[in-house]
Image: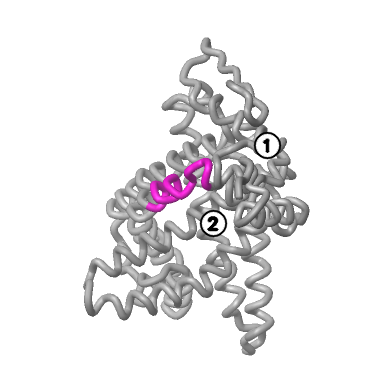
């Protein structure tokens, strides 16, 4: 039996029914639109690059953190060990070992460690800027130059890095605090979780606005920032133990390589979550949903949201200011 291009019979008819159903139900249409935007932007590749730079930045950052805390809390070894375990416990594999030995009494080592942490963190921030400018459809000609990009990356590293460390330490301090000799237990854990999520929401709101040169209000990014904060908290609590368990078994076969793979996977997962939340903000504010299944199956812009989404990509590749790119979406069956 012959079928038209839209496939109104057989398996094509079923696909068309599924497409109409998901487009008419926001609970399905919105997540699918986020998934499509993520795939169209090749955000998985961008997340992999961010994870690559993050892998090299974590070790000097932890060394610097433990050294600073060694200076500040050197008079209270018990508190020092608890803070170390709180910070390191958020990382899979690393948190299973004793804290890195701080460079106590060695200011030169501390300065070198701090410089290495900032330098490696700049790679993460610059790659994150490229990723956010790309997913927001900023033309290449409008991306910031070397010096503005470097200064913004330095700002992101200092504020974002310090913010993540402070929220982690505050959350751990409240969770394990004693009040009149009594441990807060479940209450402390709940309060610590709330503090961590609220502070991280504010931090992600700042990061989502500063990582792209698009002018965004806090309302434009708040939903994705809140989801990212919750997802990071859950992943820190649950994901670390899962990764540690898998790597513990794999080390018998792959040895040290399993540790490297585990950490890279951890950072890749965090990067993917962050970019998915950023894509969610874009789909929500630019009304890029519902999307048609034909955009996935046939590479066909089938509705208004598809057209708005795909018309932005030619603009993204504009390399110079004096080139104007015009796009035109044809009707089905028409010649371009």
- Front one among 281 and 42: 42
Quarter of the figure with residue 10: bottom right
> What's the residue at 53%, 49% (across, down)?
160
Q: Which range is magenta?
A: 39-51
Outermost residue, front direction? 1
Q: Which mark identifies residue 151?
A: none
* Image location (x, y in percent) of residue 6: 64, 43
* Residue under numbered circle 2: 273
**Image position of 74 (left or right of 218):** left
Judge whether residue 48 is colored magenta. Answer: yes
Query: At numbered mark 2, what does the secondary structure look like: helix, strand or loop?
Result: helix
> What's the residue at 71%, 46% (across, down)?
290
Q: Is the magenta stretch mostly helix, strand or loop?
A: helix
Tag 2 and tag 1, C-beta contact below 8 Å: no
Q: Which of marks 2 and 1 is nearer the N terminus?
A: 1
**Image position of 301 (left or right of 44):** right
Query: How many C-alpha atoms fall within 10 Å of the one at disc 2: few (<14), some, or many (≥20)?
Result: many
- Front one among 323 and 207: 323
Query: At numbered mark 1, what does the secondary structure look like: helix, strand or loop?
Result: loop
**Image position of 293 (left or right of 110):** right
* Image location (x, y in percent) of residue 260: 29, 63
Answer above or below: position of 259 versus 79: above
Total marks placed: 2
* Image location (x, y in percent) of residue 216: 68, 36
Quarter of the figure with residue 138: top right
* Residue under numbered circle 1: 216
> What's the residue at 41%, 42% (across, down)?
122
- Front one among 88 and 307: 307
Residue 115 visible, this angle: yes
* Image location (x, y in percent) of residue 78: 45, 80
């Amino acid at each position: 039996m012959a079928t038209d291009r839209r496939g109104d019979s057989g398996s094509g008819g079923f696909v068309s029914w599924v497409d109409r159903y998901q487009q008419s139900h926001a609970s399905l249409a919105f997540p699918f639109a986020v998934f499509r935007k993520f795939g169209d932007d090749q955000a998985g590749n961008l997340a992999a690059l961010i994870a690559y730079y993050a892998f090299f930045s974590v070790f000097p950052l932890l060394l610097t953190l433990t050294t600073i805390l060694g200076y500040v809390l050197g008079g209270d070894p018990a508190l020092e060990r608890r803070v170390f375990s709180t910070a390191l416990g958020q990382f899979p594999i690393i948190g299973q070992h004793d804290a890195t030995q701080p460079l106590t009494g060695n200011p030169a080592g501390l300065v070198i460690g701090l410089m290495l942490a900032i330098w490696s963190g700049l790679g993460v921030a610059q790659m994150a800027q490229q990723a956010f400018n790309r997913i927001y459809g900023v033309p290449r000609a409008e991306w910031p130059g070397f010096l503005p990009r470097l200064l913004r990356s330095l700002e992101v590293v200092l504020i974002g890095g310090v913010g993540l460390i402070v929220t982690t330490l505050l959350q751990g301090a409240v969770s394990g605090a004693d009040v009149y000799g009594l441990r807060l237990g479940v209450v402390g854990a709940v309060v610590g979780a709330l503090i961590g999520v609220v502070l991280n929401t504010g931090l992600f709101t700042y990061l989502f606005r500063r990582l792209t040169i698009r002018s965004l209000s806090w309302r434009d990014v708040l939903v994705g920032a809140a989801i990212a904060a919750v997802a990071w908290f859950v992943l820190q609590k649950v994901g670390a133990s899962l990764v540690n368990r898998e790597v513990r078994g794999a080390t018998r076969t792959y040895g040290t390589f399993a540790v490297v793979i585990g950490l890279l996977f951890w950072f890749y997962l965090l990067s993917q979550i962050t970019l998915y939340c950023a894509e969610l903000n874009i789909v929500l504010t630019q009304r890029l949903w519902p999307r048609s299944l034909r955009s996935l199956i046939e590479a066909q812009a089938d509705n208004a949201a598809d057209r708005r989404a795909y018309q932005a990509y030619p603009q993204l590749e504009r390399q110079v200011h004096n080139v104007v790119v015009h796009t035109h979406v044809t009707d089905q069956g028409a010649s371009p």
